[in-house]
Amino acid sequence: MARIELESISHSYDSLSKPEDEREYAVSGLDISWADGSANALLGPSGCGKTTILNIISGLLYPTAGRVRVNGNDVTGLAPRERKIAQVFQFPVVYDSMNVFDNLAFPLRNQKTPEKTVKTKVEETAEILGLADRLKSRTTGLNAADKQKISLGRSIVREDTAAVLLDEPLTVIDPKFKGELRRKLREVQNRLKKTMIYVTHDQHEALTFADNVTIVKDGRLIQKGSPEELHAQPATPFIGYFIGSPGMNLLDCSLDDGRLQFADFALPIGQDMQKKMASYGKDFKFGIRPEFLDVAAEEKNRAVEFTVAVIEDTGAYKVLTCDRRNSRIKARVSESISIREGDRVWLSFPEDKVNLFYNEQRII
Amino acid sequence: MKNRGWLFLIPALAILSISAFIPLMTVINYSLHYIFAGSSPTFVGFDNYIEVLRDPAFQGALIRQLFFSMGILAVEVPLGICIALSMPRRGPAVALCLVLLGIPLLIPFNVVGIIARVLTQSSVGLIPEFLALFNYDFNVSKYPVDAFATIFLLDVWHWTPLVALLCYAGLQAIPDAFYQAARIDGASSWKMFRYVTLPKLRSVLIIGVLLRFMDSFKIYAEPLLLTGGGPGDATTFLSLHVARKAESYQLGYAGASSFIYLFIVIVFSYIFFQLMTNIGKGENQ
């Protein structure tokens, strides 16, 4: 087990030298550290550099600049096996000419572990993964979820594994087995307390697996925190929108005479907020999560009138898309509220749930 | 007829019967009769088969043929894999490699035979001239070893590219993740080849081995053009032997030996197919 640190890591695929142009870099200036034994997620949209970061950590890629440290030791120049970092890939990797037992034993046998130890370790690992009854079976008949378990098994079977990297491990798994495998991953992490980094573009997977989520966009770190922090205090409007379902409502507004002026309505705000905002400037982005909006069917003080354009009913809750001439807001309401498309609603915005962004940075 | 879909098979069956069934039936018919030019056929049962199997010339051709085909497989398959492994995976060099490998495959058998004859002709050929520099008297129409080796090397040159191209296509289809995982699992390069590359190439190798076995078992034009099966019977392979008998109007003998020939090809192909499909596929189960 180990603490993993990235120190001003940059990587460019385009050239062997160091390009001048910022855009040439797949990732740049990353400083991230993951605590020993923690469950982490690396979350970002497709093409943001997640896999590059993972390959730099595992040693499959040598970064253009920066250092990788494991427990404080510089491992930047070391090969994957010397780092003792294991990786589970998007497509389950099993050696099809071997049975389940030999697959799990492969990393141990490569280290010339005595056959007796191999047997104990493999049986122990299979027990954790729930594969104990299939050790002698061929791998060809297994489903993708079980194959993925074998991939995971090979990474945890070595006692000296410092960390396990999971590269979108659920992408190709049948929806039927996704939940089970996700719980298994979480359970393995809890039980073994190995440092794990789970890479995904799926916020749901990231938030349910990890205690600590790192969000990357365009090769840069934009926020690192617990799922609650990311949800309640997103560092940028992008995270607000990216995390949560549906994402945060984001509206342009300006501070005008003690009120927030939107495209076609205005909201009065408190003194403290006004003061803080005034110190920044005039134009802001206003963010509020759909679940924090107060929806009323009748006119109400300090509420704004909207028309319900679309209702998406998930069965557990309803998502209302509410329109006004130039504004559109999504609100999440309980299933019990009876409402129809075309109805008028009054939305109020609880001030303590409001996020304000200035220049793409969160200020409140 | 319950299923009218069978009607659609009629054109295919018609073509197949002209190209395969009818000739095959004719051959079987011949093989059961004693036929000699002019005389009317007499039914002799399996006498022709017994004669063929007892004929030392047939036995010699068969042994020569098996030795040749096994040698071809033993050389062309590993060599093809090595070529495929050493080819670039991307870049402009790929196209160049593919063209170079493709050239031998585009040359017809008989042209290859003629090229070989020109190259090996004593007193004018390049090869005897070159080997004379090392005091080696190379003569395909005199020394059995020289003739056999020439045919063998000719086939290796002609057909190894096919195995290489098949393997190359197979290699391209192996996802990088498998190699990355093996590296992370601490596998040596040999183990990566043994447990990742080879199992993933299994299906193309089955095709490659079967194609090369069947084709080399049918080798005909090259020995015919080089030395006509000589010197002696050093390069008289099965097909040459059968063709000679047919040319001398021993149709019963030729029919029986053709049928035995076909049977041997099918049996060996089946054995190879079974071996390669099942080899090393999870031990217990």
Image (cartoon, grey):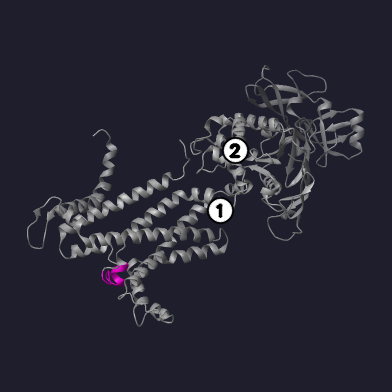
What residue is disc 2 on? Answer: A116
**Magenta region includes residue B225:** yes
Q: Vertically, is B200 above or below A297?
A: below
Q: Quadrant of residue B58?
A: bottom left
Q: Amino acid at mark 2?
A: Lys
Q: Position of residue A199 (x, y in %)?
A: 68, 40
Task: Name the residue at 65% across, 33% down.
Answer: A185
Q: Position of residue B32 (x, y in %)?
A: 14, 52
- Quarter of the figure with residue B252: bottom left
- Taking depth in this image into account, of B150 and A214 the one nearest to the observer is B150
Assess disc 1: are there few (<14), some (14-19) or many (≥20) residues with their C-alpha within 10 Å of its C-alpha. few
From the viewer's perspective, is A88 left or right of B23?
right
Q: Position of residue A106 (x, y in %)?
A: 58, 43
- The local secondary structure at tag 2 comes to helix
Which residue is at 43% across, 66% downward?
B103
User: Does residue B32 belong to the magenta stretch?
Assistant: no
A324 sits left or right of A176 in the view: right
Q: In the picture shown, does residue A302 fall above or below A174?
A: above
Q: Judge by depth and name the residue closer to the eye, B199 or B47.
A: B47
Residue A264: x percent and y percent? Answer: 78, 32
Type of residue at label 1? Trp
**Location of the C terminus of chain B (image quadrant):** top left
* Range drawn in magenta: B222-232
Residue at (66% x, 23% y) in the render: A318
Query: Is residue A245 in sight in this rendering?
Result: no
**Quick check: A330 above or below A3?**
above
User: Relative to A157, is B261 on the left or the right?
Assistant: left
Q: Residues within 10 Å of mark 2 (few under 14, many from 20)?
A: few
Asked whether, in this view, residue A160 is left or right of residue B9, the answer is: right
Q: Which residue is mark 1?
A: B190
